[in-house]
Image: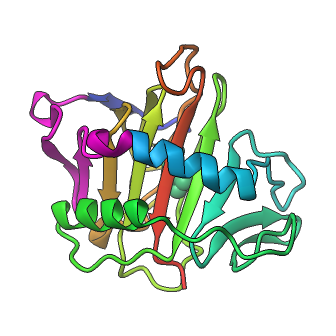
Amino acid sequence: MHAPMHDLFDAAEAEAGGAAQFAEDAWLLRGFALDRAAALLEAIDAITAQAPFRHMETRRGLRMSVAMSNCGALGWVSDRRGYRYAARDPLDGQPWPPMPAVFARLAAQAARAAGFDGFKPDACLVNRYEPGTRLSLHQDRDERDFAAPIVSVSLGLPATFVFGGAARGDRVQRLSLRHGDVVAWGGASRLFHHGVLPLAEGSHPLLGARRINLTFRRAG
Ligand code: SIN
Ligand code: FE2
C-alpha cells in the first residue's frame, strides 16, 4: 500500500498490437482483445443474465466494491467461510454458465503470446468496476496448482493496475490498462501481488461508466 511506485508503465513499444514485458514472465499485450471486444461484451451480457453481478462478502463480512460473476466449470466465490472455487453459483445452486468459445480462444492465444503454451482455463471471473471501485493488493493463490498463467482482459473505462512482487511490501509498478488490453503473468511472477487503483470517473462509448475485467485461470 505504501510501497514506492514506479512511473506509469506506458511503454511506447506497447502500442496496439505490441507486447511489452513488465516483469519476469509478465506481459502487457496492448489491444490484444480489441478485434473481439463486441463479441466479448455480448457474451458477458448473456453470462450475467444467468449469473448476475453481485457484491460478495469477505471472510470478515466486508462487502467487496467490485461486482462479480463467473463462467466456466469453476467460479471464484467469497463469503464468511473465505475464498474458494465452486462449481455452482451460490445464488441459485446452478452450474456457472459455460465458458464461451470466444473467451477460451482469446485466453489461450494471449497466454501463448506471453510464452505460455497450452493454457486451458476452467474458470473465468467477471469483474465489474464503477468509478471509485478498487481492488486491494492481493495474490491469486486459491488455484490448485500454479503452473498455469493468469490472463486478464480489460474492457471499458481505463484503470491503473498495480503489480508488485512476491512479498506484500515489494515495490509496485503501475500499468495503465485500457479497453482491449490483456495482461498475462505466470511462471516466476505467478504469485506476485497485484491490484487495481480506484477507478476514475469517465464514460466509455461501449460500456458507459464501467470497466469490466475478465480473469482467466486454471483453478481445478
Ligand atoms: C484481479 O486481480 O482479479 C482483477 C484485476 C483487474 O481487474 O484488472
Ligand atoms: Fe487477482
Q: What x and y, as percent, mark residue 178?
A: 37, 31
Where 95 falls versus 176 (above or below)? below
Q: Residue at x 23, y 28 (%)?
A: 10
Q: Is residue 185 visible?
A: no
Say whether residue 167 is magenta: no
Left-right relation of 93 to 21: right
Q: Residue furthest left?
A: 13
- As drawn, is 79 to the left or to the right of 28? right
Horizontal and vertical percent position of residue 47: 63, 56
Q: Residue at x 41, y 39 (%)?
A: 38
Q: Position of residue 220 (x, y in %)?
A: 54, 86
Residue numbers of the magenta segment: 10-37
Which residue is more in the foreground, 136 or 27?
27
The residue lying at 64 percent from left, 67 percent from top is 97
State whether residue 23 is above or below residue 99: above
Give left or right: position of 165 versus 212. left
Q: How many marks?
A: 0
Q: Give me the residue at 53% from left, 15% from top.
A: 203
* Image: 68 above or below 89: above
Q: Determine the image quadrant of residue 17.
A: top left
